[in-house]
């Protein structure tokens, strides 16, 4: 991986780590499904110019929109709404990594060497150490929904990789938004209430959290990740997302009063070591 792309993927994971904090703050003022729907409405407005695509790409983009825009985000924000400890759900979300690697091998025929598998294993052990820290004991429902979210995100990685460079990364984000917004609004209207009151009473904290998820979370981080998936195998890109929980743990301790336990520290160090090893072993892999 080139140095600019390596730096970019680290920035993406810093943003993703902060998204667990910002999302938790936003959910203090908005119900989770409504929050996701508002996010996609704003994205649809900002990215409407990227929606037009050849007819042959409409169905693949529609499926990606359903998997990410409905499935992944619905389960993600349900998890954050239920979570007591941000660190635990952030780490369990990284089950997306083995899911993505397995799907990349099975569906795309990608190859992953034993040494890169070792790096992933080290990082996943770190995730398990953090995820099964005693501070996560009360978060089983949140962990369930985050596992589902990770599985759906892994599937979306493979789907985006199969598109190749036939569409821009912002086009993928635009389609996720226009597909996800109406479905999530409909679900929110069924299961959540007092939408107008919530909009009227929301403070600048809630609106700032929403704006952050739109501009930094989706347009920069997710679109950037889709761009990297168009240029590198899933098995190379996916393990880097193991960095985001480390930043989420740091943010949770600094801003949400999460407990910093020896298990969190040990797990975080293992994640960093595993990702560093993966990058060292794949640094000379040819860019696609």
Image (tube, rainbow, N blue to C red):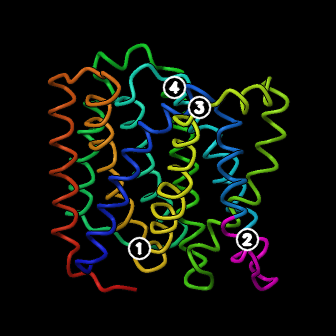
Dot 2 or dot 3: first in sequence order is 2
How far is the residue under mark 1 from the one under mark 3? 42 Å
Disc on res. 233: 1
Which mark is in front, 2 or 4? Answer: 2
Q: Is residue 278 above or below residue 130?
A: below
How far is the residue under mark 2 from the one under mark 3? 27 Å
Between 239 and 169, the residue placed more toward the observer is: 169
Between 41 and 147, the residue placed more toward the observer is: 41
Residue located at (71% from left, 45% from top): 37
**Percent of width and height locating residue 276:** 17, 59
Dot 1 or dot 3: first in sequence order is 3
Disc on res. 203: 3
**Percent of width and height locating residue 96:** 45, 49
How far is the residue under mark 4 from the one under mark 1? 30 Å
Horizontally, is 132 left or right of 216 in the view? left
Q: Which residue is mark 4?
A: 142
Dot 2 or dot 1: first in sequence order is 2
Highlighted magenta segment, given as a residue range: 46-59
């Amino acid at each position: 991986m080139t140095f600019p792309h390596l730096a970019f993927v680290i920035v993406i994971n810093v943003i993703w780590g902060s998204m667990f904090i910002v999302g938790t703050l936003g959910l203090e003022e908005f119900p989770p499904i409504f929050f996701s729907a508002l996010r996609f409405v704003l994205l649809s407005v900002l990215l409407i110019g990227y929606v037009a695509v050849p007819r042959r790409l409409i169905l693949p983009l529609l499926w990606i929109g359903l998997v990410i825009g409905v499935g992944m985000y619905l389960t993600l924000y349900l998890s954050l709404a239920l979570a007591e400890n941000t660190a635990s759900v952030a780490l369990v979300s990284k089950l997306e990594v083995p899911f993505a690697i397995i799907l990349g091998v099975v569906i795309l025929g990608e190859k992953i060497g034993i040494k890169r598998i070792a790096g992933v294993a080290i990082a996943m052990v770190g995730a398990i150490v953090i995820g099964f820290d005693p501070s996560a004991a009360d978060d089983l429902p949140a962990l369930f929904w985050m596992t589902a979210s990770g599985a759906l995100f892994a599937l979306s990685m493979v789907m985006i990789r199969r598109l190749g460079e036939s569409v821009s990364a912002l086009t993928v984000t635009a389609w996720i938004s226009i597909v996800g917004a109406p479905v999530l609004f409909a679900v929110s209207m069924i299961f959540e209430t007092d939408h107008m009151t919530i909009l009227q009473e929301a403070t600048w904290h809630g609106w700032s959290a929403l704006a952050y998820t739109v501009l930094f979370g989706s347009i920069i981080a997710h679109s950037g990740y889709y761009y990297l998936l168009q240029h590198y195998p899933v098995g190379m890109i996916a393990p880097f997302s193991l960095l985001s929980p480390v930043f989420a743990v740091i943010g949770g301790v600094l801003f949400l009063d999460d407990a910093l336990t020896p298990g969190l520290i040990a797990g975080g160090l293992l994640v960093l070591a595993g990702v560093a090893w993966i990058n060292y072993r794949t640094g000379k892999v040819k860019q696609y």
